[in-house]
Amino acid sequence: MKPRILVVDNDSEMVGVLRRHLESEGLGVLALTDGAEACAALAREDFATVLTDLVMEPVDGLAILREAQRLQPGTRVVLMTAFGTLESVIDAMRHGAYDYLTKPFKLPELSLVVRRALEERRLRDENQRLRAEVEQRYSFDNILGRSKAMRAVFDQIGAVAETDTTVLLLGESGSGKELVARAIHWRSGRRQGPFVAVNCAAIPEALLESELFGHERGAFTGADRKRRGLFAESQGGTLFLDEIAEMPAPLQVKLLRALQDRTIRPVGGNEELRIDLRVISATNRDLPALVRQNRFREDLYYRLAVIPIRIPSLRERPEDIPLLAEHFLRRAATALGKTLEGFDEDALKWLLHHRWPGNVRELENVIERAATLAVKQTITQDDLRTEFTHAESGSEPGVRPTLAEVESQYIRRILEETRGDKRAAAAILGISVRTLQRMQANMLRVGPGLTGTEA
């Protein structure tokens, strides 16, 4: 639809010139010569921009500006004046006018101001729409799950969201830890601030301190400019530290100091910088065990785990599988432009029988693949099953592989698909290369070892 412009001036000839010019530029125009009629129009119709003379009787431009702000707060108001002094223009701008034009003005000048006002309105509306989408997506009551285990998670999110307490999210890879972290952020008083996520295992150890705390120019070779760091970028918001168990020991000390003192010092810097943010961390490892092994600081663990929230695996909440599968299918069908009506009985049984070592992330990928390849409107078991998922589900009745065996099979298959590229495999699995290497070492106790090259 054409953006609608309200033009108001008690000079009918002027109104006609402005209307014809703006319509020639593809805009919809309502042109009026009476301020009272303009106020009535604002009450019944939406306008992207109002272009009004400042000096009119009995209803002047300031009255129209106030009415626009009351009825349509997002509408930009541009004032035209030939008689107003500088003081009247300043007063109008103080009351919220977007811009002003001094008569006589050239039509290209008018076009520039109106287009700028329309673009600012568009960007404002787009930002509000995106924020609303994000808030809807990440608000905890919209995280899908009706199981008792997930309802307990929802209760915990609701209890901690409005506090600034540090939260530690525990759960397997793919279980939705970052989604919960975002839900806490968007439910909190810091929702207007940034949400910054960092995977502690994905950044080389030598660069992690600079990435987190920033650095001064010349602090080390290659530091040709000053860098703020993720703590500074998270000011007023939330910093999410994923895979916190992979943080090197020297940085654990600095993180502990930052959390205790609420200050950071950039690499190569001499001044302490105050920080105001919330820290949420996450791990798929047993941190208390790492503390007992002296591989993770006990004091840091207690500082991070003031409120621990455990995210259940998909195996622990099978009643949520049909709900999630239907959600992912609808989303995939919309993206593909296909009509898909759901799952047949065998497909639903298969979904419930599969072990889902990759949790919700794996389920989403399987559904997306099935939706892409499906030739019927109803998803069948054959659409869901691949050589990999068939092996995961177990073809022999009563045979139940252990969790370690399922995990081992899953990792082997991903490495086969990536031809041994550990970086690519780690990206698919949602873990770091270091975590993948550690899991491979553990797998030697479960079955044959793996081969792979770190690209």
Image: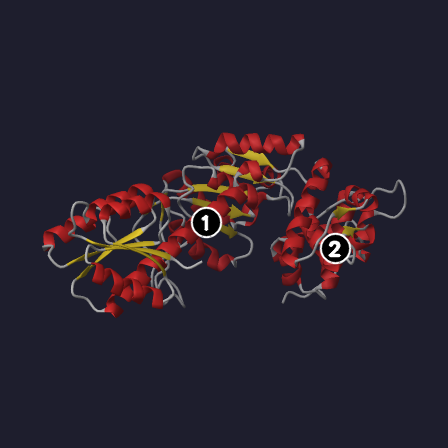
Above or below for 306 versus 77: above
Give the Cα distance between marks 1 and 2: 31 Å
User: Which quarter of the rendered picture does the N terminus lie within?
Assistant: bottom left
Q: Residue furthest right?
A: 397
- Left or right: 7, with 370 as reference point: left
**Going 45% across and 47% down the picture, which residue do you hit?**
131
SS at circle 2 = helix
* Residue corresponding to mark 2: 370
Q: Give residue 195's mark.
A: none
* Residue corresponding to mark 1: 129
Q: For this rendering, which residue is in front, 16 or 129?
A: 16
Above or below for 7 versus 257: below
Above or below for 115 versus 234: below
Provide residue 144's location: percent of width, then percent of height. 62, 39
Q: Residue furthest front?
A: 12
- Left or right: 59, with 251 as reference point: left
- Left or right: 11, with 257 as reference point: left
The kind of residue tagged 1 is Arg
Q: For this rendering, which residue is in front, 67 or 117?
A: 67
Q: How is the image coloured?
A: secondary structure
**Going 72% across and 35% down the picture, which residue do you hit?**
319
Q: Name the N-terminal-most of marks 1 and 2.
A: 1
Determine which quarter of the picture holds residue 277: top left
Density class for disc 1 (Cα within 10 Å; few <14, some 14-19, many ≥20) is few
Provide residue 117's location: percent of width, then percent of height. 31, 58
Determine which quarter of the picture holds residue 388: bottom right
